[in-house]
Image (spheres, rainbow, N blue to C red):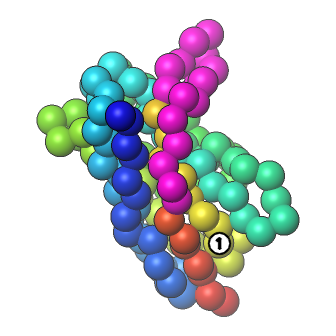
Amino acid sequence: QVQLVESGGGLVQAGGSLILSCAASGITFSIYTMGWSRQAPGKQRELVASITSGGNTNYADSVKGRFTISRDNAKSIVSLQMNSLTPEDTAVYYCNSGITRSGRFNINYWGQGTQVTVSS
């Protein structure tokens, strides 16, 4: 049974930082692409960052230069360091795992999500 368990969400002031973590189980973590998506109220779900098994990273334009995704294959953990947060980053953040094919991240699994709220 695949489980992706997020932690680290919460309330932060604009300009602040948060680190999200996702502990994965039930998958061969090291071979999967891992990522983080988010969904804000009234908006579509957005993939914000991904990291392949080889360590290649991709970011949405909205978070480039502010967010950093990393992975620890030994611990089956993927993390998202979020800096310079703005109220527009307020959303539920979901951990993802899947496969990258032809440069596209195909998400197979989702975590249950963790709320990030940025106050102005």
- Report crowding for label 1: few under 14, some 14 to 19, many 20 or more residues within 10 A (C-alpha): many
Q: Residue sitting at 60 percent across and 64 percent down?
A: 92
Residue position for label 1: 90
Q: Which region of the structure is painted magenta?
A: 98-113
Q: Which residue is drawn at 50% across and 84% down?
A: 12
The residue at the point 60 percent across, 24 percent down is 106
From the viewer's perspective, tell me whether residue 71 is left or right of residue 103. Answer: left
Element carrying mark 1: loop
On the image, the x and y values in percent for residue 31 come to: 33, 19
Describe residue 76's horizontal placement relative to residue 44 as left or right: left
Q: Could you say which is closer to the camera, residue 3 or residue 83?
A: 3
Q: Does the magenta stretch include residue 105?
A: yes
Residue 79 visible in the displayed image: no
Furthest-top residue in view? 102
Choose between 89 and 2: the one closer to the eye: 2
Pick out the residue farthest to the front: 1
Q: Where is residue 56 in the image (x, y as percent from the top left)?
A: 43, 27
Give residue 13's position: percent from left, percent from top: 54, 87
- Residue 78, percent from left and from top: 34, 45
Q: Can residue 114 be seen in this view?
A: yes
Q: Quadrant of the N terminus?
A: top left
Number of numbered discs: 1
**The stretch drawn in magenta includes residue 100:** yes
Extreme-left residue of the structure: 74
What amino acid is found at the position of numbered circle 1 in the picture?
Thr
Identify whether 9 is placed above or below 5.
Answer: below
Classify residue 120 by image quadrant: bottom right
Q: Which residue lies furthest to the right in this view?
A: 42
Q: Which residue is drawn at 37% across and 64% down?
A: 7
**Does residue 44 appear to the left or right of 23 in the view shown?**
right
